[in-house]
Amino acid sequence: MLYERSSKLFEEAYKYIPGGVNSPVRAFKSVGGTPLFMKNAQGAYLTDEDDRQYIDYINSWGPAILGHTHPEVLEAIKKQAEKGFSYGTPTELETEIAKFIVENVPNIDQIRMVSSGTEACMSAIRLARGFTGREKFIKFEGCYHGHSDSFLIKAGSGLATFGNPSSPGVTKGTAKDTLTAEYNNIEQVEDLFKHNSGEIAAVIIEPVGGNMGCVLPENNFLQKLRTLCDENGALLIFDEVMTGFRLAFGGAQELYNVNADIVTYGKIIGGGLPVGAFAARNEIMDYLAPKGAVYQAGTLSGNPLAMRAGFETLKLIKKDENFYKNLAKTTETLDFEIGKILNEKGIQHKINRKGSMMSIFFHISSVSNFAEAGNANHALFNNFFHQLLANGIYLPPSGYESWFISDAIKETEIDKTLEAVRKFEYFN
Ligand SMILES: Cc1ncc(COP(=O)(O)O)c(C=O)c1O
């Protein structure tokens, strides 16, 4: 049996951890089968408990952009650990990383560190509400901004109606302040502003969607949101938890040349340790405690180990002027070559790609929003996933997730990946 020890470990985990995992997507519920238990991660590779090696296209869901356990990041963490794990006081390091980010990312003056992307987005919404004195906000179907109550809302039956909680435990009272629109549908956003005039604090968006598979903004969607927010006195929040330091050092703001009012970060900013952050210009950040009245805090916020891992990762990226060009080239090669093989096999598909994010949708010609992502053939994706896994390629275990290409993926890994795709057997 390929995954014998993982199966046993999952059985045991199931007794003590809800569903056997500490975050739902890890349970392979979407693709079926037993989740693999990993025991080591180096460069482009993961090793599971059955001693099988995989080329990793998840990279811890984004943070490991340099590949796993980069020697210089490891060394920096070790050195920091010798000086203590957590002080609960300000440190010089926090200012150093904040200054480095503010100086190298467009359009932000101050940044506040937290411990997860969820916290970052939750706090960004509170700050936008505090700043504007308004309560409602707009989000897009298929965008994920963490598991805070106000984000777990699906669209109501009509645009003028309230949203509905998408999870038990989220109250109707919370749901009424979250308005939802279709990704890439500017008319729906215009309608929401019209029906809720003077009430909308913010629009929050993944500037490139990564949680419905990879979905790109089309027809200047981001620029149009910027204009609508300006016209209506609302703030534009870019959730750059995935795209920040990934699409460019300055994230989607830099790549698309659109300024957001508040930007949230996570994943890469912590270099593999638990970090999130949110940032904005002074005028907005001055509303935040202890200077301003909008409360936000965290026992481990700015934790020295996490700051060290993040800072080292960001400096390594910044040092290499070809970093993003090379990553995009690797991803483009994967896109073209995988596409070619699938075409040769007569499998209709659409690959969406931006920078080092990509995903494959089967049996559909274009995907611009969540509903279209849902119309792809997910059963076929699941089959593709399992066959590649058996051949040592670890893709995200769902057709609704973006792949994250790391800098550790080189020609050898591309060749091995293409070999596995060539072996893919598809029965009509
Ligand atoms: C765009 C986006 N925002 C927010 C989050 C939440 O981040 P975290 O899982 O660190 O709470 C995620 C997580 O994947 C994400 O992809």
Image: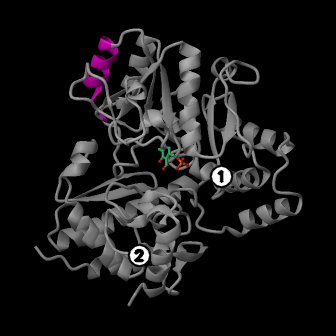
**Which residue is the extreme one toward the left?**
428
Residue assigned mark 2: 393
Q: Quadrant of the N terminus?
A: bottom left
The amino acid type found where label 2 is placed reads Ile
Q: What is the crowding at mark 2: few (fewer than 14 residues within 10 Å), some, or many (at least 20)?
A: many
User: Dot 2 lies on which element?
Assistant: strand
Residue 415 visible? The answer is no
Per the rendered image, the range of residues in magenta is 183-195
33 left or right, relative to 70:
left
Residue 402 lies, with reference to residue 44, above or below; the image says above
Asked whether residue 186 is drawn in magenta, I would say: yes
Asked whether residue 359 is drawn in magenta, I would say: no
The amino acid type found where label 1 is placed reads Gly
**Disc 2 CB within 8 Å of nearest ligand 1 atom:** no
Q: Position of residue 14 (x, y in %)?
A: 46, 70
Q: Position of residue 406 (x, y in %)?
A: 52, 63
Residue assigned mark 1: 270
**Does label 1 or label 2 sit earlier along the sequence?**
1
Residue visible at 70% across and 29% down in the picture: 110
Front residue of 306 and 158: 158
User: Dot 1 lies on which element?
Assistant: helix
Q: Position of residue 329 (x, y in %)?
A: 45, 60
- Which mark, by number, is residue 218? none
Residue 336 sits in quarter: bottom left
74 left or right, relative to 155:
right
- Between the C-alphas of marks 1 and 2, the distance is 25 Å
121 left or right, relative to 286:
left
407 left or right, relative to 199:
right
Q: Position of residue 362 (x, y in %)?
A: 21, 60
Residue 216 lies, with reference to residue 257, above or below; the image says below
Q: Quadrant of the C terminus?
A: bottom left
